[in-house]
Amino acid sequence: MRVTVDQDKCVGSGQCVLAAERVFDQRDEDGVVILLDAEPPAELDEDVRQAAVVCPALAIELSE
Amino acid sequence: MAAAPERVPSRIVVVGASAAGLTTVEALRRFGHDGALTLIGDEPHLPYDRPPLSKQLLDGTWEPDRLRLRAPEALDALGLDLRLGTRATALDTDRREVCLADGERVGYDALVVATGLSARRLPGTRGLAGAHVLRTLDDALALRESLRGGARLVVVGGGFVGAEAAAVARTLGAEVTLVTDEPAPLADALGAEVAGMLAGLHRAHGVRLSTGVPVREVTADAGAVTGVRLADGRLIEADAVLMGIGADPNTGWLRGSGLRLDNGVVCDATLRADDGVWAAGDIANWPAPEGGSRRVEHRTNAAEQGIAVARAVLAGPEAAVPFETVPYVWSDQYDLRLQTYGRTRGAERVRVVEGGTDQLRLVAVYGTSDRVTGIVGVNLPRRTRAYRRLLTGNAASDENAVGAGWDAVDAIAREDAAPVPQRTAG
């Protein structure tokens, strides 16, 4: 799975980090998402999907 | 004849096409439901997101297309029977049918109620020009239109919607007065210290605050608002009035259905309301782990419950697991981003643990005398999240308690002094 994030849309909720902390982090100053791994291993697929769904800003896009 | 096990629903109907309903249908497909799936929504628009209504949509940086929850192609791919602009008017739980406004009845094996909330209005304001609420896209566009040209806006209510709209309206050049019977906007939700900081910020941006006095009525002439009359007789003149006085669950169509309705749809811990019926989002009222019941009107809760209900529907009542969450909400006002985890309303104790109100950035911990129940952060998002673990069961020294004791707060505060740990690879 390939992950892209839209930092302009991100509202810094950190919900993605809670769902998949090996894939997402937040900038210290404004909480905006940092993508740690754009092609995470398959065992993280479900966590990454959860992150994309709970993102309140719809800032995470996934493609197979 | 062996009856098919009831817990494999072939026809699933979701009523409510906003964040909770849409997340539910999407998760149902993702978790393998390939049978009939109907999504019914009363608004004519493709499913859209609500938090930006009082933020980027209202201030004009975003147009409605940007609020779409999913692109039209992504919706198509779900293979839904999508009924927009369609109001559900009744529920027949005996025959397992949803009745629509046009008289059609839609049968279901499993039903998810996600009809959300309607904004409250002050008496006599329906149909009055210049009297606004802010719940739907159409509401937000109408309010945005009314803020042009230095209009005089009175915001009634000191909640998140009112405070955000006041900030946006001021930024757009409107004359803004915010009226609340609380000592400050958001005083109930955030306590005197943080609410006081926000009040100062609103004043500094030129919002007039009228606190401590309730509203008596919206005044009008020739079908248009002229102002707001307070309980002490004062009149505040206005071209537009925004009523930000909360919202009520849309349960009218469920009357007589046999579902238990009490501040929403009453559910069990797995969000199941009755045989074959579940609820998700703002409307679901489920037992709180700390006792009593809980209904959460937040965007992230809608998505989390949509996923949980999709799992519960497909698992069946015996296998469903209780829904657990740490409620999260954020609010943008001017250059401040405020983030809240857990419960802060009515806290007995509030402690600012990092930053301070004078810096316009802080983390504050809320709770009862002995337990932490909520966290508020202002412009410190990453540090605010660090304290969230006080609210999950793992942090509690007492396994039965929901939040950690206050002594656990200092350990997290001390982390800040140390360098942020480097993530190890893999």
Image (cartoon, rainbow, N blue to C red):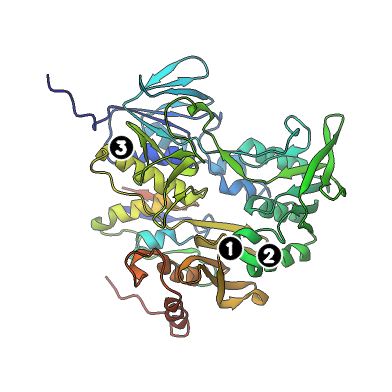
Relative to residue B404, is residue B336 drawn left or right?
right
Dot 1 lies on which element? strand
Pointers 2 and 3 in contact (CB under 8 A)? no
Give the residue drawn at x 44%, y 71%. B386
Quarter of the image that includes the C terminus of chain B: bottom left
Which residue is disc 1 drawn over? B338
Residue B199, how many percent across, how many down?
A: 72, 64
Which residue is disc 2 drawn over? B198
Which residue is disc 3 drawn over? B313
Give the residue drawn at x 47%, y 79%. B413
Quarter of the image that includes the N terminus of chain B: top left
Amino acid tagged 1 = Leu
Pointers 1 and 2 in contact (CB under 8 A)? yes
Dot 3 lies on which element? helix
Residue B389, how many percent across, how many down?
A: 40, 68
**Residue that sits furthest to the left in the current view:** B1
Classify 10 Å Cα crowding around label 3: few (below 14), some (14-19), many (20 and above).
many
Residue B5, how many percent across, how many down?
A: 19, 29
Residue B142, how many percent across, how many down?
A: 71, 37
Per the model, the C-alpha gap separating discs 2 and 3 is 43 Å
